[in-house]
Amino acid sequence: MTVTAVDLGIRKKPEGEKILLIEDNPDHAYLVRKSISEALKSQVDMAGTGEEGIAKLKSGNYDLVISDFNLPGMDGMEILQMVKEFNIDVPFIMLTGQGDEKVAVSAMKLGAYNYVVKDDVCYTILPRVISETLTKYRADKEKERFEREIREKSEALEKANQELKKLDELKSEFISSVSHEFRNPLNSIRESVELVLDGVVNANEEKGRRILEIAKTSAERLTILVNDLLDFSKLEAGKMKMEKEPADIKRIVQDAVDSMRPLAEKKRLKLEIVPPTEKIVVFADPLRIIQVLTNLISNAIKFTPEDGRIDVIAEPFDDPKPPVQKVKVSVKDTGIGISLENLSRIFERFEQVKQPHRGKTPELQGTGLGLSICQEIVKLHQGNIWAESELGKGSTFIFTLPRYR
């Protein structure tokens, strides 16, 4: 069964193929050109030497090259070699004299698609050889394209499988970690309540108040855990709603800082606001942006040693990509900083970057989902979030929001 260009879904160009003929004998060149033009309606360009042929191949876009072997200066084999060296992707047919079959075989080994012996019938069979050569060449190109696509898709599938495997491992670790995080505060709350109910401690005495403070802190830990899990599940399902409205960014920052100030004061940290020099209104969900800010401030408090400083800065920001007026909010601390390795993955889901704590104040633990949730909330506001840090030199978490017009 003969496979044709139509079978392969390959259509010939309406104007016919563009063919370059390299031939120094004017009579032979005329006969070859006449044969091709009449049978295939193709455009045939002429070159009388190998040098002229290579120059035309470099500057033109040809569908096929036919070259005589016996040429002055540069023979057909040298032309074929230069075609390969210059990475000119075009099918090549060699014209050889009678008795030059060895030359033809060598040409095929070097990359020629076909050859024709110059005899009495060569001008008759040449159009058929050209058609067969073009069909084979196009079939080879289609095969290469299919193989390349299969290879690329296989690589993409393998990468996706590796990512899924990693995600599955992280989820398993996450579930184990969260289970542990739930168990600890629940046990603490139960034991604290039992001590009070059994009369072991008096709630009105200092020891009793300390026990109840421990129970309160544990309840707050559970609240963080539950809220993170609920928010994460909503984001995963695309069901987190944003109640956006025009809002003053200074008011949002003030509310977030006021809610976190008691925790900062326990650790003797200075928590300051650097307000914008002008009124900046954003179109945002104030409660969700406060959630982002309190998460960033809470992290800054955790990883900043006692007597350190945390600044929350709001300022205008002109984003050049695309040119949009925005507000930039930064939470800058004098804490222990983040290593470059950890900095690249702190916003990833299920990643819990281990950082050493400094200070005597007990820290509220979370799920490790906080920064991932912050990132998604900021994205839903058409903003960006990133971090800048260096070990031992503090950290700055920055996010942007478009200004309201």
Image (cartoon, grey):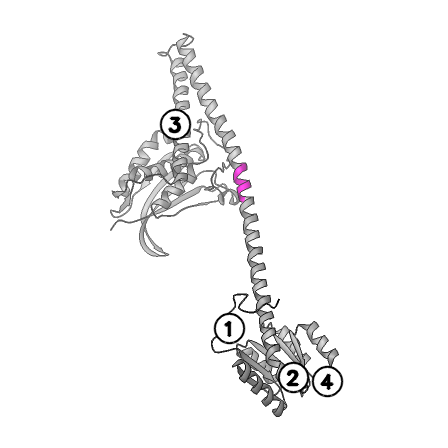
Location of residue 24 in the rendering, given as x and y in whole percent from the top left corner: 63, 89
Boundaries of the magenta span: 163-169
Give the main secondary structure of the magenta stretch.
helix
Alpha carbon of mark 4 to alpha carbon of mark 2: how far? 11 Å
**Helix, strand or loop status at disc 4:** loop
Disc 1 to disc 3: CB gap under 8 Å = no
- The circle drawn on residue 12 is 1
Q: Is residue 108 visible?
A: yes
Location of residue 277 in the rendering, given as x and y in whole percent from the top left corner: 27, 48
Q: Amino acid at mark 2?
A: Cys
Location of residue 403 in the rendering, given as x and y in whole percent from the top left corner: 28, 49
Residue 74 is left or right of residue 7, and the answer is: right
Depth order, front residue of 244/93: 93
**Helix, strand or loop status at disc 3:** helix
Q: Is residue 307 visible?
A: no
Alpha carbon of mark 1 to alpha carbon of mark 3: how far? 69 Å
Hey, which quadrant is residue 92 in on the image? bottom right
Mark 2 / mark 1, whichever is N-terminal? 1
What residue is drawn where x is 40% and y is 19%? Answer: 215
Mark 3 / mark 4, whichever is N-terminal? 4
Mark 1 / mark 4, whichever is N-terminal? 1
**Magenta stretch: includes residue 257:** no
Q: Say which residue label 4 marks.
A: 98
Disc 2 to disc 1: CB gap under 8 Å = no
Q: Say which residue label 3 marks.
A: 223
Number of residues whose C-alpha sits closer than 10 Å to that of mark 3, classed few (under 14), some (14–19) or many (20 or more): few
Alpha carbon of mark 2 to alpha carbon of mark 1: how far? 24 Å
Q: Amino acid at mark 4?
A: Gln
What residue is drawn where x is 43% and y is 11%? Answer: 195
Alpha carbon of mark 2 to alpha carbon of mark 3: how far? 88 Å
Mark 1 or 3, closer to the camera:
1
